[in-house]
Amino acid sequence: MVRGDDDNARFANVVLPHLKDAYALARWITGNRADAEDVVQDACLRAFRAIRSFANGSARAWVLTIVRNTAYTWIGKNRPAALVAVEDIEAVEIARAIPGDPNAETPETALIAQTDVARLEAAISGLPIPFRETLILRDVQGLDYREIAEVTGVPIGTVMSRLARGRSRLIATIGRKES
């Protein structure tokens, strides 16, 4: 087997299983689909070039670290500093109700669910970047504290602090909007 074939196989085993998570993280950081796709593409190129340096640890954490770093590099190059804030997240699609199905979602329940999701996404988007990314890595991506510390390059205590503060701010923001 040629060395390039080894790299291709390793890339397929290490990176490709985590593309969905990579895109989700890039989407949260950049705030829109097109930019997230660009970031993931760039991150995949970086991961492929560095695939020989992967030391058989947590592949997911390794890939998400590359995506995170790529996203911030991409934002720095492609957006003025004043526009780094996340844009509004696209609306969630409303599922079509099946006529006659008693368990089907009604237009009213779909609208309420969509409003709740939009409110939560807006509140998350409003968090400062360190809190937002820690919250997303833990509560959306499901990484443990050690993996988040590895991805973000901060001590585990900082991860725990950011997560607690981010959740607290999120609860406070949602609570204010409901009042």
Image (cartoon, grey):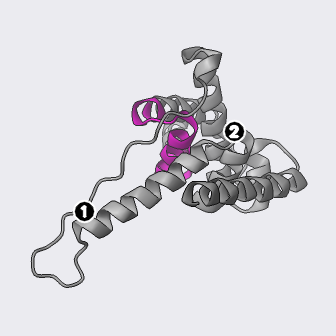
Q: Is residue 151 left or right of residue 50?
A: right
Q: Pinpoint residue 50: horizontal percent, then vertical percent.
A: 64, 34
Dot placed on the residue nearer the N-terminal end, 1 or 2: 1
Is residue 175 visible in the rendered structure shown here? yes
The amino acid beneath tag 2 is: Ile
Residue sitting at x 10%, y 81%: 100
Residue sitting at x 62%, y 45%: 64
Residue sitting at x 38%, y 64%: 113
Q: Which residues are magenta?
A: 9-37
Residue 139 sits in quarter: bottom right
Q: In what element is the residue under mark 2?
A: helix
Q: Residues within 10 Å of mark 1 (few under 14, many from 20)?
A: few
Magenta run includes residue 15: yes
The circle on residue 129 is 2
Q: Pinpoint residue 41: horizontal percent, then vertical percent.
A: 47, 32
Q: Pinpoint residue 57: horizontal percent, then vertical percent.
A: 72, 55
Residue 177 sits in quarter: bottom right
The circle on residue 20 is none
The amino acid beneath tag 1 is: Ala
Magenta run includes residue 11: yes
Q: How many marks?
A: 2
Image height of 154 relative to 95, above or below: above
Q: Pinpoint residue 112: horizontal percent, then vertical percent.
A: 37, 64
Q: Residue placed farthest to the left in the image?
A: 99
- State the predominant SS element of the stretch in magenta: helix
Which residue is labeled 1 in the image? 95
> Of residues 77 and 151, which is closer to you in this image?
77
Q: Is residue 72 left or right of residue 113?
A: right
Q: In what element is the residue under mark 1?
A: loop
Image height of 21 relative to 99, above or below: above
> Of residues 100 and 66, which is closer to you in this image?
100
Q: Residues within 10 Å of mark 2 (few under 14, many from 20)?
A: some
